[in-house]
Image (spheres, rainbow, N blue to C red):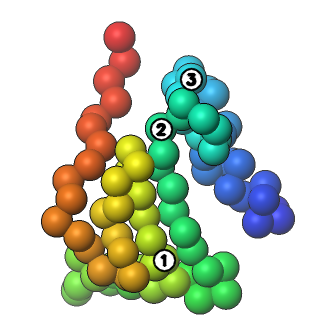
Amino acid sequence: LTLEECVAHLTARPAARLRLPDRGRIREGYRADLVLFDPETVAAGSTFEAPRTLPTGIPHVLIDGRSVIEDGRRTDVLAGRAIRRA
């Protein structure tokens, strides 16, 4: 997969399959769930011994437009909510 195909496979396609009309794409009026990552350095940081270690190469994460990771560090912001089917 190309990087673009991989991102679509992990975002827009699941949102469409789950019928989540305001997710999976970057558009006005959509939920701003964004992950800024460096494809050259992104890697899982967690192991079985240290499962809460943050990944590397992901400096910023926004959930519902609120920054939960800034400069690779957690913020105190608790954003988002569980999505339940009707």
* Side (left or right) of 60 relative to 46: right
| Type of amino acid at the residue the image marks with label 1 | Ile
Residue 29 position, x and y percent, is 54, 30
Q: Label 1: which residue?
A: 58
**Spatial separation of the CA atoms under disc 2 and disc 1:** 20 Å
User: In the rendered image, which quarter is residue 36 located in?
Assistant: bottom right
Residue 85 in sight here? yes
The label on residue 45 is none
Q: Residue at x 61, y 80 (%)?
A: 38
| Type of amino acid at the residue the image marks with label 2 | Arg
Relative to 49, say whether 62 is above or below.
Answer: above
Residue 27 position, x and y percent, is 64, 38
Q: Secondary structure at mark 2?
A: loop
Q: Residues within 10 Å of mark 3 (few under 14, many from 20)?
A: few
Q: Residue furthest right?
A: 2
The label on residue 21 is 3
- Split into 4 quadrants, where in the image is the C terminus? top left
Relative to 63, say whether 59 is above or below.
Answer: below
Q: Label 2: which residue?
A: 31
